[in-house]
Structure formats: C-alpha cells, structure tokens
Image (cartoon, rainbow, N blue to C red):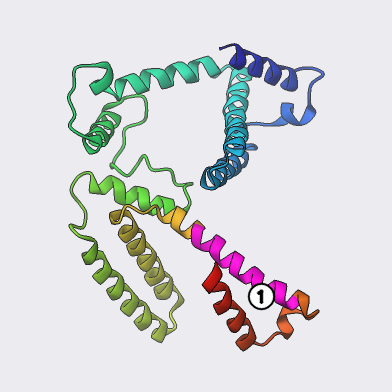
Amino acid sequence: MEALDRLMDIMDTLRGPGGCPWDAEQDHKSIMKCLIEETYELADAIEEEDAVDIKEELGDVFLQVAFHSAIAKDNKLFTLDEVINDLCDKLIYRHPHVFGDAKVSDSEEVIKNWERLKRKENTKKQRESILSGIPNTLPALLNALKIQSVVSRVGFDWEHPEGVVDKIKEEIQELEEAMGTENEDRMEDEVGDLFFSVVNLARLLKIDPEAALRRTNKKFSRRFYEIEKAAKERNIRLSEMSLAEKDRIWEAAKKKI
C-alpha cells in the first residue's frame, strides 16, 4: 500500500493550497472525458501488445481512479480506501465458488452466477429490467454487444450464427426498401437494425465487434496512406488523382496489407 499512499499524498498536494490550480478546480464531471480517453489509449496499447505502453496507460487509467477518489474525499463523500475495500467485498461476494462453498462446472456458469448475484445486491437502486444497469454512455457498438450478452443469459438468443446471417440479409433488403422511399428516419432505423444484427453475428462467432472494427479501421488507414504517398511522390493533390488511379493503388495495397 506504500505506492497507493504516495499517490494519494501527491494528489492531496496537487489539489491543496499552493498546489496546481487546474487540479484543484476539477470535479467528477469535468474530468469524466479523461477517463474515457485514457481507457481507449490503454485498449490501443493492449492491441499492440506493447508491455511498456500497457504499463504506462494502466498508470494513466489508475490516475483517474485516484483523481475521482481525491475529489470525493475533499467533498467528504468517500476515500480511495473505501473504493478498494468495497471492491474487495464485491469480488469475494461474487466468487462464492472460490471464497465459499458454491460449485461451478465452467466459466459460463461463473458468468450466470455473477449476473444473478449482481441482481441480488442492494447497494444500487432497484432495477426495473436486467438491462437497466448497462451504462448509457457506452459507445453504441459496445452497448449493443452488452445488451445482447445480457439477454442471452436468460435464454433470449439465436441458436446458430446461420440464423443471424439470414437476419442480416433480411435487414439489408429492408434497408434497400427504405432507401427507395428516401425517408431518412426509416433509413436510420434500418441501418441501426443492420448494425445490431452484425454485432449479434460477431458475438455468436466469439468475435469482439469493437476490436474487429478497429482492426478494419487501421487496415483501411494503412491502405489509404499508400494512395496519399503516391500523390505526394507525384507532387499532386489527392483531389487531382482520378478515382480509377486511386482504385488501382488501393487494389495493389490490398495485396500487401
């Protein structure tokens, strides 16, 4: 705990008299976006499998935990020690197969028990639905995945991925019909339905849709860079390059990237 004490002493100094004016002015809402940004930077480091970066980004994420805890302590709400102890109690409670007498056969049963125990906890307001605990601030792709994962645990799910493939084909047909009407609301609904179905397919194939899309984004960026590089070598603007030439470079890039 020496490292934690050192960190919180630094936070107290930064937010205290004679400390950093910016740190002292912050509240939970003002630094909320920092936590989100640091989490994504950690995800990038993990994807790159760079241990040095992972360690640094974990520190940046933990800084946000410490910062929020320091703000709460200053407002006499709670301390970092309380955050950690509450977490320890929760981990013990939700792992009765480790710290108690419960028996489980596999990790799937662990997840079901975890969700059941979460619903029994009285530390949060009563939830009207099993979906009520899903954060609204999650990116839409992750939100869809979380919704589908939760309802699947109570048996509301597809039996086979092939069924979702048929559903995707159906959604594409409905989108094409909506495009024919030029009704923006209807087209938005159908695009949303298509995204939701694709996320479902990824989940059943045990593919993280967020990671898959990030991978494609990076692949697209690397291939597009080849077009930019070609334009630069010819000393012309991208807008001056014909679409046919862009496509030719793109197809060449696909073979090596």
Above-or-below relation of 34 to 242 = above
Residue type at mark 1 is: Ile
Q: Provide the residue span drawn in magenta.
A: 215-231
Residue 37 seen: yes
Q: Secondary structure at mark 1?
A: helix
Is residue 121 found left or right of 14 in the rendered image? left
* Magenta stretch, overall SS: helix
Is residue 158 found left or right of 33 in the rendered image? left
Above-or-below relation of 212 to 66 = below
Q: Position of residue 154 (x, y in %)?
A: 20, 44
Quadrant in the rendering for residue 201: bottom left
Classify the position of the N terminus by image quarter.
Answer: top right
Image point (74%, 22%), residue name:
14
Q: Within the magenta stretch, is there residue 142? A: no
Quadrant in the rendering for residue 124: top left
Is residue 33 found left or right of 101 in the rendered image? right
Q: Within the magenta stretch, is there residue 229? A: yes
Residue density around tag 1, few if under 14, some if 14–19, many if 20 or more, within 10 Å: many
Image point (32%, 24%), residue name:
122
Q: Position of residue 68 (x, y in %)?
A: 59, 27
Q: Which residue is mark 1?
A: 227
Above-or-below relation of 175 to 28 = below
